[in-house]
Image (cartoon, grey):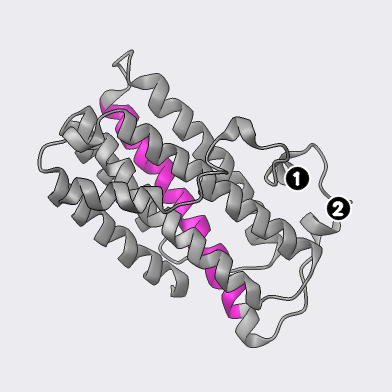
Amino acid sequence: MMLSRNLARLSSFPSCTRSLSSRIISSTSAYLAPSISGNPATSTSPSLSPDQRQVLDSAIRVDQAGEVAANYIYQGQMFILGKDPATRPILQEMWDQEKKHLTVMNLLQVQHGVRPTALWEVAKVAGWGLGAVTALMGKEAAMACTEAVETVIGEHYDDQLKDFDRLPSHPSIDLLKGVVRELRDDELEHLDTAVGQHSQRAPQHALLTAVVEAGCKIAVEVCKRV
């Protein structure tokens, strides 16, 4: 039952953008270029109404917090599973993408003058703990953690893109939408990887993913506000 539910949810995400190799233009590269100071899309922020400001602030705040947590999840998993020659490169590739995501979110936070979450340190500890504990349960459980997290985050990014329709037309907003789409596609690639690495063979898979998904949803809502 749980397997069918998760596969149905996975198939509901956009399939045409699920491959990194199929992307012609990378939105995040605008922030990772040697110099971004001359680009209004990466150096300016629009004038917003209070409601629009809330949309933008909460989105960047929660996305930045999520990338902090994601980096520490992989750090915890690597601490336990990093000596496994078959598992290490898989985790490292996903972690390297999360490092890039966090760099971009940090730059977006500064660009738009958004207050970071007050739970920054909590995100680090919780992320590392979740990564380490699931890795101690075995490779499949670590992948089940990734499957659950990325399922929630994929849905979260899709909801966020709908919220962005309330924001005005501006070069920085257009770029932000592209960044969020790219991050979503990367996270869904991680979901694909986790399933391909037999995440659904993890002990108590249904319970494990339900608990992780519930925790992620709570964290998303809290970090939007705190």
Magenta segment, prevailing SS (helix, strand or loop):
helix
Q: Position of residue 145 (x, y in %)?
A: 27, 43
Q: Residue furthest bottom?
A: 50
Q: Which residue is mark 2?
A: 39
At x 41%, y 54%, the residue is: 12
Residue 30: which numbered mark, if any?
Answer: 1
Q: Is residue 166 left or right of residue 14?
A: right
Q: CA distance from mark 1 to mark 2?
A: 9 Å
Q: Is residue 61 magenta?
A: yes
Q: Nearer the viewer, residue 102 or 139?
A: 139
Q: Is residue 213 magenta?
A: no
Q: Looking at the picture, does residue 84 appear above or below residue 23?
A: above
Q: Looking at the picture, does residue 15 appear above or below residue 194?
A: below
Q: Residue furthest top?
A: 85
Q: Quadrant of the C terminus?
A: bottom left
The residue range painted magenta reads: 54-80
| Marks 1,2: beta carbons within 8 A | yes
Q: Amino acid at mark 2?
A: Asn
Residue 210 visible in this rendered orientation of the protein: yes
Q: Is residue 15 left or right of residue 217?
A: right
At x 53%, y 45%, the residue is: 185
At x 25%, y 35%, the residue is: 199
